[in-house]
Image (cartoon, grey):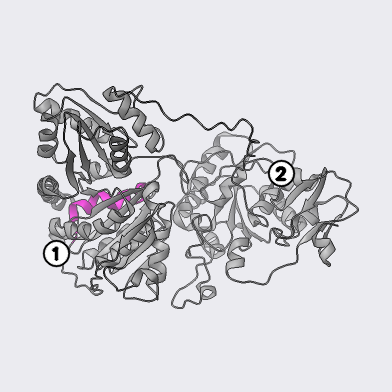
Amino acid sequence: MHKLLTDNPGEKMMLLGNEAIARGAIEAGVAFASTYPGTPSSEISTNFFHMARESDLYFEYCTNEKIAMEVAAAAANSGVRSMCVMKHVGVNVAADALMTLAYVGVKGGMVILSADDPYMFSSQNEQDNRYYAKLSGLPMLEPSSVEEAKEMLPYAFDLSEKLHEPVFFRTTTRINHSSGVITLGEIRKPATKGDFKKDPLNLVVVPAVARHLHIKLLENYDAARELAEKSESNFVSGSGSWGIICNGVSYSYANDAINDLDIADKTRLLRIGFSHPLPPALIKDFLKNCEKVLIVEEGEPYMEEAVKAMAQEEGLTLPINGKKEGLFTRLYEYDPAQVKKCIAAYFGIPYTPPAAIDVSDVPQVPQRPPTLCAGCSHRATYLEVKRATEGMETIFPSDIGCYTLGLLPPLSAADFLICMGSSTGTVGGFSQVNDKKVISFIGDSTFFHSGIPGLINAVYNNHDFTLVILDNGTTAMTGHQPHPGVDMTQLNMEGYNKVSIENVVRAIGVEHVTVIKPYKVKKSIESIKEAVNYEGVSVIISEEVCALYANALKLPKRKPFYVGDKCENHKTCISSLACPAFYIWNDRVRIDANLCTGCAVCAQICPENAIRRVKTEADAQGH
């Protein structure tokens, strides 16, 4: 049995934040869950995926976040508790559905999890999705710890059903990917079947309907604000005339700093966990008892701006600061030392940070930039595209996925990227205004997510470029989640269909479609040259299973390679391919047999044919 289905209330369990969130949803009686995977939220969905095979939970990996929002909205409007999970930029994709869903509302509880990513550990921006709550008019909750994330979720579902609105549940990477001890609660039996009641004058949002629904949304907002005033998620601790207002993981940092600086008797702390709508009466009462206030919040000055406005309404003139020179920044993730330093500086507390550890005698740690795995088929494809286009001036729009790592030398096969699916849109713009050859790259999961409309647009407008679809049979970067092109029988799962990328591309109207096997270097280069020289839209589908996924599926392994005596040390293998299985020993190229997957790409580009397949133990040791 999956550990998160353990029905033993009171038992303590060490869980990753995302596991705790998944358990909280199960305790809340979630019956329907949907997602498009994205770090830092991915493990929530992975756990739902596995639990759905052992419980009454229904779970979908959806084509994109907008679809995930829509299927969950339909379930919730049938009276079934639903949860929609995504990373912060996924809400951008889902926003079209979200903004009007706020008008329509829900019948059963619906929680929308937005996993924000301060410092951009795995994201293209660090947008603050508290503003989506403000934009949509929907309530938002923010936990401050792993345990609270689990405990707060049942309340989020109850709140949704009380207001008949979806509720945002905002986390950050530090909550998602920390571990903590949680106490198991009772599991509420989910209601898996709903009953949709037809009510078109409230559920079909034509303008006349939308006008009265907007009134309802504003009434719900007022009701939510009253609930925020009384919510246990918003509380004051401590006493004194110095005030600190904080949210999320910043609460833990601020609380620790108050204790470490020994100012608990001078400081009052207001933790905001029900963060939209903010509770104005609670905040104004807090301000009236303070001589100065510091706002501790990662990201944008969301609370700071609101608190200053509330102070003005009350005619209060106390100093209120947060984001300013010498205090907190709008950039990146906060840490305990930073918060302690800023609190000390703001309130004039003598504080000397601990001396930095002397590491002058420690050798510098070599930098390890992220890289494509040994044997990655994307690496082979990039090599082949570069060789097929030698002598050409090229532009390489790229997309979001493992293959984005093609931007690094020596592959250098990514020139422009803004969002999921942008490769099939931007490539058309580049091809229209440049005389250079434009070749764009997109992964299989990303193609289904948002690449298809751009390709349709290109065919319709008769653009001239080559699109390379890197089909490695899984959603690799976020942890090998399935997508519509995955063969689910390999996962021993029935009841799914498989959508052929080639059939989709041909159905769109692309006339030049080529399927290559990137481990066959010479043949692939020839096919790529033909596609690149074609006038109009051409598509290359590069098919080869992800090396890590193949290992997880226990597919047959190839024997590794070694560098033989014929090697003249040109290092072409490193300067062209740079597979991580290569290393230099005594200025000679070696291959780590433990990393090598036996793809044979390096052997095919070696000018001396010096790279051979291992036959003996001595070969494997490079002797």
Dot 1: what SS?
loop
Determine the secondary structure under disc 2.
loop
Q: Is residue 477 visible?
A: yes
Q: Measured from the top left, where is residue 359 in percent x and y?
A: 59, 33
Say which residue label 2 marks. 389
Principal SS element in the magenta part?
Answer: helix
Where is residue 79? Give x, y as percent. 19, 68
Is the residue 395 above or below the residue 206 in the image? above
Task: Tell me where residue 196 appears, x and y as whole percent.
Answer: 19, 70
Query: Crowding at label 2, few (<14), some or many (≥20) Cα neighbours within 10 Å?
Result: some
Residue 176 vs residue 27: left or right?
Answer: right
Tell me where residue 575 appears, x and y as whole percent.
Answer: 75, 43
User: Label 1, label 2: how many angstroms apart (C-alpha)?
Assistant: 59 Å
The residue depicted at 14 percent of the width and 28 percent of the height is 311
Q: Is residue 463 above or below residue 179?
A: above
Q: Nearer the viewer, residue 421 or 303?
A: 303
